[in-house]
Image: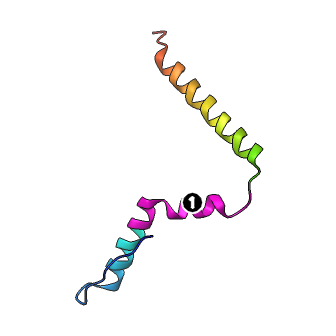
Amino acid sequence: MAHIIVDDSEPLEKAIKRFKRIVEREGIIREYKKREYFEKPSTILNRKKKSMRRKLMRRTHRGRSDY
């Protein structure tokens, strides 16, 4: 859980900006959007397989030098 301590002398805008940075770094917004709707287990599996295929294609494409 993200939390910050705001000093009396610190401007509110600066504290909000700091809070947003912490939330972004921890991936809270990304996690929320991912869990916003139910996703079937088969859909999750297909997405992961597609991601792995893309990753392997990139890796093999980079390793090959035709020049």
Q: Is residue 24 magenta?
A: yes
Please identify the residue farthest to the left as the structure is shown. 9
Does residue 61 sit above or below 65 in this rendering? Answer: below
Please identify the residue farthest to the bottom as the structure is shown. 8
Task: Please state which of residues 2 and 66 is positioned toward the viewer in this rendering.
Answer: 2
Q: Position of residue 53 (x, y in %)?
A: 63, 29
The stretch in magenta equals: 22-38
Name the residue: 47% across, 17% down. 63
Does residue 19 sit above or below 36 in this rendering? Answer: below
Name the residue: 56% across, 30% down. 55
Instruction: Count the marks.
Output: 1
Task: Please state which of residues 27 and 21 is positioned toward the viewer in this rendering.
Answer: 27
Q: On the rendered structure, is 41 left or right of 15? A: right
Name the residue: 77% across, 51% down. 40
Q: On the rendered structure, is 29 left or right of 19? A: right
Name the residue: 39% across, 75% down. 3
Is disc 1 placed on a helix, strand or loop?
Answer: helix
Check disc 1 and report the residue beneath it: 31
Does residue 19 sit above or below 9 in this rendering? Answer: above
Which quadrant, please, contains the N terminus? bottom left
Does residue 40 sit above or below 32 in this rendering? Answer: above
Label 1: few (<14), some or many (≥20) within 10 Å? Answer: few
Could you say which quadrant of the image residue 51 lies in?
Answer: top right
Q: Position of residue 13 (x, y in %)?
A: 35, 81
Task: Please state which of residues 16 and 67 is positioned toward the viewer in this rendering.
Answer: 16
Q: Is residue 37 magenta?
A: yes
Q: Position of residue 18 (x, y in %)?
A: 35, 72
Which quadrant, please, contains the C terminus? top left
Q: Position of residue 32 (x, y in %)?
A: 59, 64
Kindly report the secondary structure that dominates the magenta region of the rendered protein: helix
Q: On the rendered structure, is 33 left or right of 2? A: right
Tell me the amino acid under the disc marked 1. Glu
